Amino acid sequence: MKEISDGFPIDFMFGAGLSAPQSEGGFREHGKGISIPDLHKAVLPNNRKEHCKLNKENVLEYMRDNCDENYPKRFGIDFYHTYPQDLQMLNKLGLRCLRISIAWTRIFPNGDDEEPNNEGLLFYDRLLDEIISNGMKPIITISHYDLPIQIVLKYGGWINPKVIELYVKYANLLIERYHKKVKHWICMNQINLLFFEMFPSIGIFKEDCEDYEQTCYQAIHHQFIACAKVKKFASTLNDPALAIGTMLADCLTYPYSYKPKDVLLSQKRNQMQFYFSDVQIRGEYPGYILRYFKDKGIQIQISEEEEKLLKEYTMDFLALSYYYTMAINSEKDTLEPSTFTINPDFKMNEWGWPHDGKLLRKNLTDYYDRYNCPLMIAECGIGELEELENNKVHDIERINFYRECFESLKLALEDGVDVLAFCAWSPFDIVSSGSGEMSKRYGLIYVDYNDKGEGSGKRIEKDSYTWYQKVIRSNGKDLE
Ligand code: BG6
């Protein structure tokens, strides 16, 4: 009989994660090309529920703009230069894994270059070696919302099947070069968030779409095919430990009331997000989405060869990001993914995100029951406005949220749910992906920069750093 774990398994990967566009900076260095996030300006504080938006006109204008201080993701937290010292802090924290992403534009500056940029590769050679020598297993996200801008301008983004080829060339190069050092690979960051983050996800301007949904679903189909091709390539490397995964932002909902209408709408909403992982892990388009396509007149171009590819090359694990949960009230919420009801039991941050660690157990169980494949918490965290007080940050909200998440996770593990890793988002304060602000702070470590990149850049351990260090040292036993 299978052994059920008592608490956290001894090899559980307590870790953390960050992405290249939010942390690296080094925008003008060593031949890097321009990617979508390099053109993001921070939203204004009175507009915090909005995300960074770009239309074609902005893109062309901002590409020519050399005032880097207006684009926080051009400087990030300067991780491109500070990583050796930063990683030492993570070593002292005791992290067992670190999720990073590779900037596509450091490797292929225009996305379609014949040859890779050697300086970009050399940077990641050094970074990965340094992560490993600091005692952490690297986990790589191949594309974290940072499509090369030339793929948008020249090819029209992921609607163009040519982009499948370009991505596969880039991804296969990385996997071939690094698979001996890196065993877990996430193809795309949060593949299901395209209706929230359409431009960063698929590189298509909404205003260019004749039929918005048709375009989105076809573009995502191209991403499914690209991931399956990458998996096909990885399986030729004869490396049994190599695992290629997909990633969802956890958007599972629950009914706001016992009313059948709430229950059914919540289930439908969940299906609309399960569809991504159903295709990638079960290997085919499920009936409920085919019906949706039929009702909406959406026609996906899919060949027999592609159907076979999806069936044969399914993903090895499911990575998740977990920030908040959503209740569904059929009197006001709809199938539109941005609609949900906030459970009044939970406190919200400035950006309107209600934090609730308790349902992590339920959601992990739902995914595991459905797919029976390893799960990874690739991101989990809480963004707050924080100030230094006497050189300290007492981030008690963060500690409380993480405590709840770890308690939940432990119960799930004890129920037999297979979770490989927990990556706190983020080890450092980094630029917010959605709002472009540095002041939405997620870190266990405070970074002294403001939204304009002004500050000393000094790193200061927050209370949550010391707390997480204790959690890791006790292998998850000491959550006090
Ligand atoms: C996830 C992204 O959606 O959420 C991260 O993968 C991001 O890149 C995180 O940082 C938190 O979102 P935000 O917008 O607060 O940075």
Image: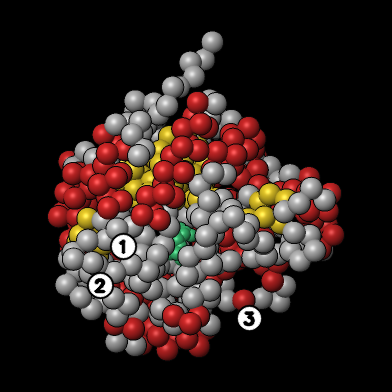
Residue 269: percent from left, percent from top: 71, 54
Quadrant (top left/top right/bottom left/bottom right) for the N terminus = top right
Contact between labelled residues 1 and 2, with CB atoms less than 8 Å apart: yes
**Which image quadrant for residue 114?**
bottom left
Q: What residue would you read off at disc 2?
A: 449
Q: Which numbered disc, 1 or 3, marks the residue that appears first in the sequence? A: 3
Residue type at mark 1: give it: Asp
Indicate yes or no: mark 3 CB to ligand 1 under 8 Å: no
Residue drawn at x 67%, y 62% is 340
Residue type at mark 3: give it: Glu
Quadrant (top left/top right/bottom left/bottom right) for the C terminus = top left
Q: Quadrant of ligand 1?
A: bottom left
Q: What residue would you read off at disc 1?
A: 429
The front one of 124 and 254 is: 254
Q: What residue would you read off at disc 3?
A: 207
From the viewer's perspective, is the residue at label 1 or at label 3 nearer? 1
